[in-house]
Image: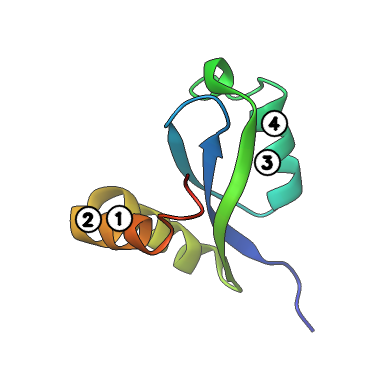
Amino acid sequence: MIKSMYFVYLIKSLFSDRKCLGCTSDLARRLREHNNGLVKSTKQFKPWKLIYYEAFLNKYDAFNREKELKTTYTKKKYLLGRLKNSLK
């Protein structure tokens, strides 16, 4: 039985080239928070759309993946390259 899932996600602003990478246990709620201006770092670029996510059974795996994507330039560049058509 799966207790809960954790997600690493990538969202993109609909009105700018801004992108945001994050981690959450409730993807729908977190996207609503971004779009309702409840996240200080993203509120000026709303609305946002979900571009990509990865699901994990363990929160530490999810947090480690988020950190990996945020701090390893080549991994982030590779991911963004794979999503180039979705980011248009």
Label 2 or label 1, whichever lies nearer to me, is 1
Mark 3 crowdedness (10 Å alpha carbons): few <14, some 14-19, many ≥20? some
Q: In what element is the residue under mark 1?
A: helix
Q: Which residue is mark 2?
A: 72
Q: Which residue is mark 3?
A: 30
Residue 82 image offset from top left, x and y in percent: 38, 64
Label 4 or label 1, whichever lies nearer to me, is 1
Q: Which residue is mark 1?
A: 76
Residue 11 image offset from top left, x and y in percent: 54, 43
Query: Would residue 67 appear left or right of 50 to someone viewing this image?
Result: left
Disc on the earlier residue, 1 or 3:
3
Mark-to-mark CA distance, 2 and 3: 24 Å
Disc on the earlier residue, 2 or 3:
3
Mark 2 crowdedness (10 Å alpha carbons): few <14, some 14-19, many ≥20? few
Q: Amino acid at mark 3?
A: Arg
Q: Amino acid at mark 1?
A: Lys
Disc on the earlier residue, 4 or 2:
4
Q: Which residue is mark 4?
A: 33
Tell me the tag on residue 63. none
Whether residues under marks 4 and 3 lie with C-beta atoms below 8 angstroms apart, the answer is yes
Whether residues under marks 4 and 1 lie with C-beta atoms below 8 angstroms apart, the answer is no
Residue 14 image offset from top left, x and y in percent: 58, 31
In the picture, residue 18 is in which quadrant? top left
Whether residues under marks 4 and 2 lie with C-beta atoms below 8 angstroms apart, the answer is no
Whether residues under marks 2 and 1 lie with C-beta atoms below 8 angstroms apart, the answer is yes
Q: Answer above or below: position of 29 versus 34.
A: below
Mark-to-mark CA distance, 2 and 1: 6 Å
In percent of the image, x 51 and y 53: which residue is there? 86
